[in-house]
Image: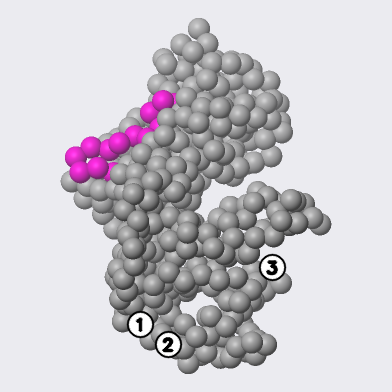
Amino acid sequence: MIINYPKPRSELVRIRAAYLHLTPGISALEYAQRRSKLASVLPKDGIAILAASHVKYRSGAVFYDFHQDSDFFYLTGKSTADDDHTFHLYLRPKDPKVEQWEGSRSGVQAAVDVFNADESGDIKDIEKQLSRIISDSSEVFTDASPSSSSASAFSRLFASKTPPNAQGLATLLDQKSVKPLRSILNEIRNIKSDAEISNMRRAGQASGRAFTEAMRQAWAAEKDLTAFLEYKFKRNGCDTSAYVPVVAGGKNASQIHYVRNDDVLIEGDLVLADAGGEYGNYITDITRTWPVSGTFTTPQKDLYNAILATQRTCISLCRADASNSLDKIHQIAEASLKDSLAQLGFDMSGNALEILFPHHLGHYIGLDVHDTPGQSRKNPLQVGQCVTVEPGIYVPNTDRWPAAFRGMGIRIEDSVCVQEESPLVLTTEAVKEVDDIEALRA
């Protein structure tokens, strides 16, 4: 996909089509407005070049589920006319034999008819088209990288000095000012529209209900709980899981990215589940920790409530009028946890907190679980940003720590949208109060 600015033009505006949803919850008009916003910050005759994801193979002809590049997805879609830039979209042509195996393709004509591109063509001809467009540009903004053995065909073009049908793109780029696109798109993507927030709320609601349904039941194995959550995400309305779940019983919860999910669950232990569904490509991120038996022991309850109190405080600070950054709220979480743990008998001297709470309190979310990568967590939160709030404590099974808490891992996480005066919790359907959790199995 290529966006030029400025290129004044006139064409029939398909007003009715503009308000149709190209993807769940997102209108064609909104996709056009996103492209216009990007074009408006490009310099005169500047261009932005983005590549779609390519199919990745697990082994041989066995491929992974396809997931579109988030920046490409964010900017494409059926749209109304764009008045001040040119939208090029190059696709694979229709091929009945291939489609019999791989499924339907949009085809080249759909770039204009469905996605309302200004110019389109066969992706195989991209070399010639890019050479022309790059030659006419003042600056190039792209995150496409030079070739590697696993790179997409599009990316490999950028390392080509002498492609057969065009001046080498790498040579052309050597003559241009080439700048990264990600930081520009991060600023645009980081503030969510009402439609995006609605999609994330829908994903959060469906996923939260799945968690609560899971807590109602007794589970003997991590894999069974994993399968139930992923099924319920879809059954409740999500398209798929947002990421590989963490379902960790007992000591496994101390491994923050534990994804084996193949151990047994033991009465008397806690189980930590970090999972979420995806709706219209927008994700939700939830973690809940609860007792396998359905009832907390006293030490489990004490540590859990200390973490929950910290989480509630931090969520309340996710509002624009508080002028807090994620880093600032993280510092508040550290102080809260340090004080609470000391009251429970932990020696919090030295590097204790670093060991017990080794990750950041939160991150941005949206189309990706860790959305807008590279976006600073030092800036004050703004209306429309969506973040996670996820304090956790992971107690090693060593003599340094109080015996009653050794081996416990507890994290409580919600997805939150920043508003002016109060936070909007997107995942409230997942119960988290001790009394509510225990009541589910009473």
Cβ atoms at labels 3 and 2 below 8 Å apart: no
Q: CA distance from mark 1 to mark 2?
A: 8 Å
| Residue sitting at x 44%, y 65% | 117
- In percent of width and height, residue 73 lies at 48, 56
The residue pinned by badge 3 equals 150
Q: CA distance from mark 3 to mark 2?
A: 30 Å
| Residue sitting at x 42%, y 87% | 136
| Comparing labels 3 and 1, the label whose residue is closer to the camera | 1
Q: Residue furthest front?
A: 12
Q: Is residue 420 magenta?
A: yes
Q: Residue furthest top?
A: 442
Extent of the magenta region: 418-430
Mark 1 secondary-structure assignment: loop
Q: Is residue 37 above or below residue 164?
A: above
Figure quadrant of residue 178: bottom left
Task: Using the image, tell me which numbered label, if any, was put on residue 136.
Answer: 2
